[in-house]
Amino acid sequence: MGEFKVHRVRFFNYVPSGIRCVAYNNQSNRLAVSRTDGTVEIYNLSANYFQEKFFPGHESRATEALCWAEGQRLFSAGLNGEIMEYDLQALNIKYAMDAFGGPIWSMAASPSGSQLLVGCEDGSVKLFQITPDKIQFERNFDRQKSRILSLSWHPSGTHIAAGSIDYISVFDVKSGSAVHKMIVDRQYMGVSKRKCIVWGVAFLSDGTVISVDSAGKVQFWDSATGTLVKSHLIANADVQSIAVADQEDSFVVGTAEGTVFHFQLVPVTSNSNEKQWVRTKPFQHHTHDVRTVAHSPTALISGGTDTHLVIRPLMEKVEVKNYDAALRKITFPHRCLISCSKKRQLLLFQFAHHLELWRLGSTVATGTVEAMCLLAVSPDGNWLAASGTSAGVHVYNVKQLKLHCTVPAYNFPVTAMAIAPNTNNLVIAHSDQQIFEYSIPDKQYTDWSRTVQKQGFHHLWLQRDTPITHISFHPKRPMHILLHDAYMFCIIDKSLPLPNDKTLLYNPFPPTNESDVVRRRTAHAFKISKIYKPLLFMDLLDERTLVAVERPLDDIIAQLPPPIKKKKFGT
Amino acid sequence: MVQLRPRASRAPASAEAMVDEGQLASEEEEAEHGLLLGQPSSGAAAEPLEEDEEGDDEFDDEAPEELTFASAQAEAREEERRVRETVRRDKTLLKEKRKRREELFIEQKKRKLLPDTILEKLTTASQTNIKKSPGKVKEVNLQKKNEDCEKGNDSKKVKVQKVQSVSQNKSYLAVRLKDQDLRDSRQQAAQAFIHNSLYGPGTNRTTVNKFLSLANKRLPVKRAAVKFLNNAWGIQKKQNAKRFKRRWMVRKMKTKK
């Protein structure tokens, strides 16, 4: 394997922005996530939670609400007063329509998926009809005194509940008039001068309205009579989000302290038919406000100001209890934000609005610049591999400018690609941790790739939960492939035998000084090192030097907004 | 010959004859009162306008001229026609005036807006300049010239070209400055509201530093806070101290010599 000098880079000041909204789509098992800087990301939950689509954003288009409508259409609305529809095929914004009500605070799609309801700053609730290519304004409901911060449809589509400041209104959809106005207490059994903001409402099919507010209460109201049924005080800070499961037997709420509570409908005694809502599980996976939650049939999804997306599968809903049922925390980006110029010893960092170019050391190196992520260029400049949203990786002949061949499609998206310097083998890594090696001149998979596929990967390799984001090669050693994900980097030596499930995948190595890499211990092909983590990028600068860009979590947290104060005994 | 009747009517009649309209009027009246000529009037002063020159002559020499209904009707029609003519002429004159005024205003308006050449340049320039990532709306605010604003013509609006789709070809939008200001102020008010409700007074917030250090305090082996040193403390004092030290060194060097 050899010894390398490592440039350990920690000055890439990458701070992701906080998560503002999530929206779960049941039919396609996809999750849309919008952040405070306006970017919208689409995660494919069945493809190992891989981020497959990305819409770059701008602060002026920061979203306050996100929802899916019928036919896989994604809409968002924000404080600039516009409703935007995203084109998921072309990866751009189809159009932005001004709602003329001032900043928009909330949006909800009707249960049938054909209508869109929007709650605005001036207290008006506007109904839009979703036409095949656009949306069209239908009518206004009765205007309320204060801004409408949350909306929810009754599953039958006849009534809606709207949460505002200090009160909740129930509207009748057909007439547009307010049927009930339910006043919310400012504090549970106490006195408070601050206004009580109803951050979320949910309407159940039996007519119960669940509201969560800034005093830390979860309250159950009866919409037929307009009265309070039950009140739970669950936190000392705001409860900011609520999401109900489709079967309406459980819901999840998120608080500003970072705690996520799960409520379930359980029978009062083991035999009775009568059921009641009980707070069952608390989860503390966040440090800052949990501003949004979603409930999929098998998992609870939460996201907030601390920028992590946490997906917690529920044990009782998961059929097979394997590694899939573990917690998933998505922190680091699934794309490569750094590129490296080997000849010039330069690193290019990609931020949201600017790029930074840094120069490393002063060694002489050979090699060429390679493109990023879904494009890969061969070092001799003859071939270009591109993978997009459609299946299959296409390889183009650059000199003749035509399609050379297509790698057969695979049902999981590609996370990283690279072309080896001399052999012109295309190495592709997928989101389910499979790796393929395809020979471009021969137009078929290489023998090594076939052996690997036949034997299968080690089970620990497949259980890694961060995708491989970069692949590179050693110019003088064609049998080596260097790849990394967020928590490890690995050099695959094709000349050595492959590990089977019984061998140790991660070899312990003797303590050496920092600039040395894993030493050869057992003779199997996957040499894995976890010295540098969390790793954003790793590449080979020349034959003797590596560069590793890390991003410690503490550095990210140090730049986040202030969290809620927690009082601990003894401090 | 002794003239028994005073010719008082002559003077007004002759005065009328000098004016065109007066003649028409008198002819009209003559037609009206045509049948009355035969009747003896009580006094010449009572109806001086009735008679005119021709009437005078008739009195003198011949029998009163017979005025048939048809001729009178014809004359009446003539009168009407002539009146209508004048009215129409007046109307057309007014119309002309108004048209000229309108054109003048349009001229002035055109002069106020940017000349067409610049507008063309703007549209072609922004179409070719598509280096932005797809999905970004570029807003071009057309600025009014200062002297035009001073003219104080509020009804004039800059042409708003609203481009619906935000595809690669049309990625710009021209808006009115006033609208944008209103929108910005509302957006800022909304952002201020949410900032106040989450981070404003009355919320129980702490710094990230203290939050992370809480765990350190409870460890079996207590550790320091995450960011123990506060380098931003007493900047002024430190600067003063540095300056003082430099001066002291210089003084020391001088006295040593």
Image: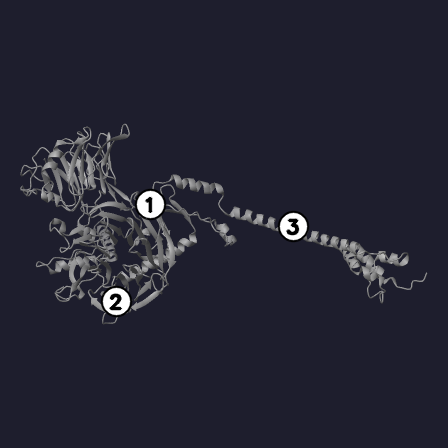
| Badge nearest the viewer, 2 or 3 | 2
Residue highlighted by disc 1: B135
B50 or A206, which lies in front?
A: A206
Local SS, label 2: strand
Q: Position of residue A267 (x, y in %)?
A: 15, 65
Q: Residue at x 34, y 48 (%)?
A: A132
A85 or A189, which lies in front?
A: A85
Quarter-wise, where is residue A284 in the image? bottom left
> Is A176 on the left-hand or right-hand side of A367?
right
Q: Position of residue A363 (x, y in %)?
A: 18, 35
Three-letter amino acid code at the position of disc 2: Trp
Tell me which numbered mark, 3 or 1, is placed earlier along the sequence: 3
Q: Residue furthest right?
A: B1
> Is B180 on the left-hand or right-hand side of A155?
right
| Badge nearest the viewer, 1 or 2 | 2
> Mark 3 to mark 1: distance in Å?
57 Å
In this rendering, does residue A351 appear at all?
A: no
Residue highlighted by disc 3: B92
Three-letter amino acid code at the position of disc 3: Thr
Q: Residue at x 4, y 38 (%)?
A: A522
Q: What chain does mark 3 sit on?
A: B
Local SS, label 3: helix
Q: Residues within 10 Å of mark 1 (few under 14, many from 20)?
A: many
Q: Residues within 10 Å of mark 2 (few under 14, many from 20)?
A: many
> Mark 2 to mark 3: distance in Å?
75 Å
Q: Position of residue A383 (x, y in %)?
A: 23, 31
> Is B113 on the left-hand or right-hand side of A509?
right
Q: Are marks 3 and 1 in contact (CB under 8 Å)?
A: no
Residue highlighted by disc 2: A221
> Is A335 on the left-hand or right-hand side of A129?
left
